[in-house]
Image (cartoon, grey):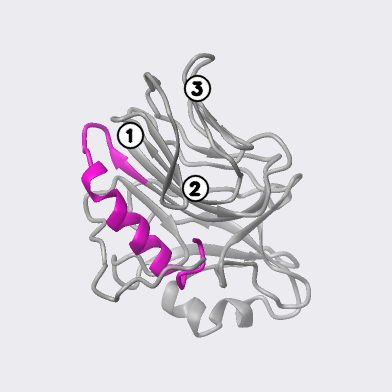
Amino acid sequence: MMRNVSKEQVYDYSQARNVYAFVDMGFGNVEVVVIQREDNNNYQGFTVEDIENGDDIAFCSGTKGLVREIKDHTGNNNGIQTDPTKQALWIDANGNRTQSYSKPALLFDGNQGEYNFNLSNSQYSQMFAVQNSQINFNHFIRFSGAVLYETNLYVTANDNLNFNESYGLFTIDNINFIGRRNAQVEDTANNLSQIFNRLILENGYEGKFSALILFPYNTDVSQDINLIEADINRRFNNQIY
């Protein structure tokens, strides 16, 4: 059942370490994705406003549009893939943009799509991941030693959070060891000791990727989790939960 979220429930993500999404997250009209034409490998960056205007579809007229770069709204770490055989799909051959919760998304087909964000020497306390479609193969988001794999966040052999489904809005609280899906607590752990320091969207993941938000280590935003979840849901037209 969808929940109505007032327009006043807007969260300021300026303290986030990394923000990846293809909707407005409050950082202004920044580039959020770089699209590459399949036929000639020409590429161009697009803002949320460009996407809303359909400029990305016009740019890819007559061919598929692949994702060359996933831009970080904060400007810290972009995910780049220059090999077209490993780029996720943005626009199909019929000119249709991939959508999730009626918003733009990346389509991973299980064989194509691999991005290394080079998040070295960084630690993360909380993670908010928005994605849709069942995860059928390998990894969705892989950290160094931490994997959101099918319905589980594995940190070590003994440290994991179990989720009932593999789609929706996932909140991983690395300070209080809580895993939430669609604004409901689904599992707790005694310890989540792994340092999250390397992010890869990996070939083998099948489904749609919509957004990922990471907060710096020891930046405890657990008191804001309800507001953040409601805000993310609002930015996806109240369709996540």
Residue type indicated by callout 1? Tyr
Quarter of the image holding residue 105? bottom right
**Image spot of residue 31 (x, y percent):** 41, 66
Write down the residue under mark 2: 79
Residue type indicated by callout 3? Gly
Categorize mark 1 by other alpha carbons within 10 Å: few (<14), some (14-19), many (20+): many
Q: Is residue 227 magenta?
A: yes
Q: Is residue 28 magenta?
A: no
**Image spot of residue 41 (x, y percent):** 67, 63
For the residues marked 1 and 3, what is the alpha-carbon distance in whole angstroms? 13 Å
**Image spot of residue 218 (x, y percent):** 22, 32
Q: Residue at x 38, y 69 (%)?
A: 24
For the residues marked 3 and 2, what is the alpha-carbon distance in whole angstroms? 19 Å
Upstream in sequence: badge 1 or badge 2? 2
Rendered position, 49 above or below 175? below
Q: Residue at x 72, y 64 (%)?
A: 38
Checking the image for residue 8, the label placed there is none
Write down the residue under mark 3: 145
Upstream in sequence: badge 1 or badge 3? 1
In front: label 1 or label 2 = 1
Magenta stretch?
214-241
Checking the image for residue 124, the label placed there is 1
Residue type indicated by callout 2? Gly
Q: How many marks?
A: 3
Badge 3 element: loop
Rendered position, 234 above or below 72? below
**Image spot of residue 139 (x, y percent):** 63, 36
In front: label 3 or label 2 = 3
153 displayed left or right of 96: left
